[in-house]
Amino acid sequence: MPATFHHLELLSRQVHQAHRAAVEEELTRRGLRDVNPLILAILKHMEQTQAQSFSQRDIARTLGISPAAVTNSLKTMENSGYVIRKPEQEDARRNRVELTRKGREAVEGCEEAFLAVSQRM
């Protein structure tokens, strides 16, 4: 492959890493270090489009990550009061996940953080 391609690939990775670091810094500055913005955004979307909550398995499938990774993020966010998990009535082995009021406010804070980073970039 031409050297130009490798330079572009490296530059792309550096920009991605810089963006990620800037978003993490902005979230921390806003007191949102314990949140996973993607999970919160999915829950907000599901809340707005359906009358039902979303399961941990649904979140993992949507994000293309392992259920264990989702469980770890949700545990942190639940301990911080952003989400609640409830066993499903039909199948107690599955947890439904819902945003709390604090979680809904955090979604707005995440949106503002991403916007601030985008404007700076």
Image: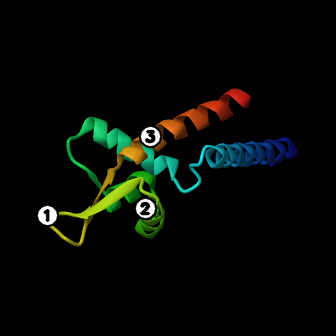
| Few, some or many residues within 10 Å of mark 2 (<14, 14–19, 20+) | many
Report the side of 25 relative to 65 (left or right): right
Report the side of 41 relative to 90 (left or right): right
Residue at 44%, 64% (x, y): give it.
79
Residue on which disc 1 sits: 89
| Amino acid identity at mark 1 | Gln
Tell me the tag on residue 5: none
Residue on which disc 3 sits: 105
Q: Position of residue 43 (x, y in %)?
A: 36, 46
Q: In the orientation shown, which residue stands out farthest toward the top?
A: 119
Query: 77 or 52: nearer the eye?
Result: 77
Residue at 26%, 50% (x, y): give it.
53
| Few, some or many residues within 10 Å of mark 3 (<14, 14–19, 20+) | few
Secondary structure beneath dot 1 equals loop
| Few, some or many residues within 10 Å of mark 1 (<14, 14–19, 20+) | few
Determine the CA span between mark 1 and mark 3: 28 Å
| Amino acid identity at mark 2 | Leu
Q: In the orientation shown, which residue stands out farthest toward the bottom?
A: 93
